[in-house]
Image: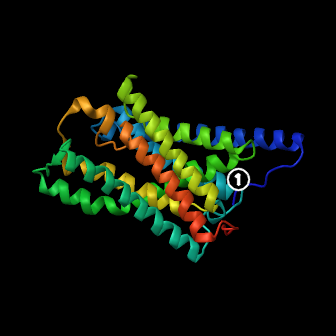
Amino acid sequence: MEPAIAKTPAERRQACVSGVATIAGYGFCVFLLSLLFSFAAAPVVELPFWTVFRRCASIAAALSLWLFIRTLERRSFRSYGFAASGAGKRQFRFGVLLGLSALGLLFGTWLALGVCRVHITADSLKLWRTVVGFLPAAVLVGVLEEMVFRGFILQHLLACSKALAVIASSALYAVVHLKASALSLAVWLELGGLFLFGGVLALSFLLTHQLYLAVGLHAVLAYGARVNKLLIEFTDPSLSWLVGTSRLVNGAASWMVLLMMGGMVVWWVRASHGGGAHHEHA
């Protein structure tokens, strides 16, 4: 569960400053470890340094998370949103179903309208290695990133306010996932889509007080973003502002689907729990 909200203005300010300082310390630790790992790996891998750095950042994020939660805070990972309960399993299943439904709606519509077509890559080894091999990786990505953004970062910022917690955690999530270096309309559209997706994931935590739903949804969309480029191609690049690309969230229509997903999360949580108390703490 998230840290208790302080009651007096002075306590709230102190808790907010403490939360921001903790996040800043975590970010510095991730950055420092990423640099160290990158310099160690760069001489033995034939990849650009920035590519190496981005990959090392995932390892650094996981190690830093363990250091801060287990060693410095002396808390359990379950206390950040992985309480052992049957409700968690139901939330995870709904997240997976919602993600699959969103992908089906997007690609089904685009295929029906002719703005994309089935185009299976000729590299069968790469195809099956990705289709099968990325399944566990997608779940791992979902767990790690939800622990970082909706677990550690959002929950520490709740000491300031819910609005700040959602906006800041979603903005950070969007920025670290951006691959392009030059700003353009496509980049802004992708940033907006990533921010909205982060908001949906944050909403799922605020409503359930658990990360299971967010992990299921995140894992499915991460899998879809990796696999779809091997199965389909978009026929008209000039429509990318509307329909997006293989990145999934960078089209105006994708934004509408993300907003619909947020509405579905609200509906499902209320329907599942009758609008009453619905969360279980570790």
Q: Is residue 91 depicted above or below 112 in this figure?
A: below
Residue type at mark 1: give it: Leu
Asked whether 139 or 54 is in front, the reply is 139
- Quadrant location of the N terminus in the rendered image: bottom right
Q: Locate residue 64 relative to residue 50 in the image: left or right.
A: right
Where in the figure is residue 277, as x and y percent of width and height? 70, 67
Q: Locate residue 272 relative to residue 155 in the image: left or right.
A: left
To which quarter of the image does residue 217 belong?
Answer: bottom left
Q: Residue at x 45, y 55 (%)?
A: 218
Q: Is residue 42 depicted above or below 134 in this figure?
A: above
Q: Residue at x 24, y 46 (%)?
A: 110
To which quarter of the image does residue 115 belong?
Answer: top left
Where in the figure is residue 117, as x and y percent of width and height? 16, 47
Residue 37 in sight: yes
Q: Is residue 127 depicted above or below 173 in this figure?
A: below
Q: Residue at x 42, y 37 (%)?
A: 53
Q: Which residue is mark 1?
A: 72
Q: Residue at x 41, y 64 (%)?
A: 97
Where in the figure is residue 6, as x and y percent of width and height? 84, 49
Q: Is residue 226 depicted above or below 83 in this figure?
A: above
Where in the figure is residue 164, as x and y percent of width and height? 67, 39
* Picture colour scheme: rainbow
SS state under label 1? helix
* Neighbourhood count class around disc 1 (C-alpha, 10 Å): few under 14, some 14–19, many 20 upward: few
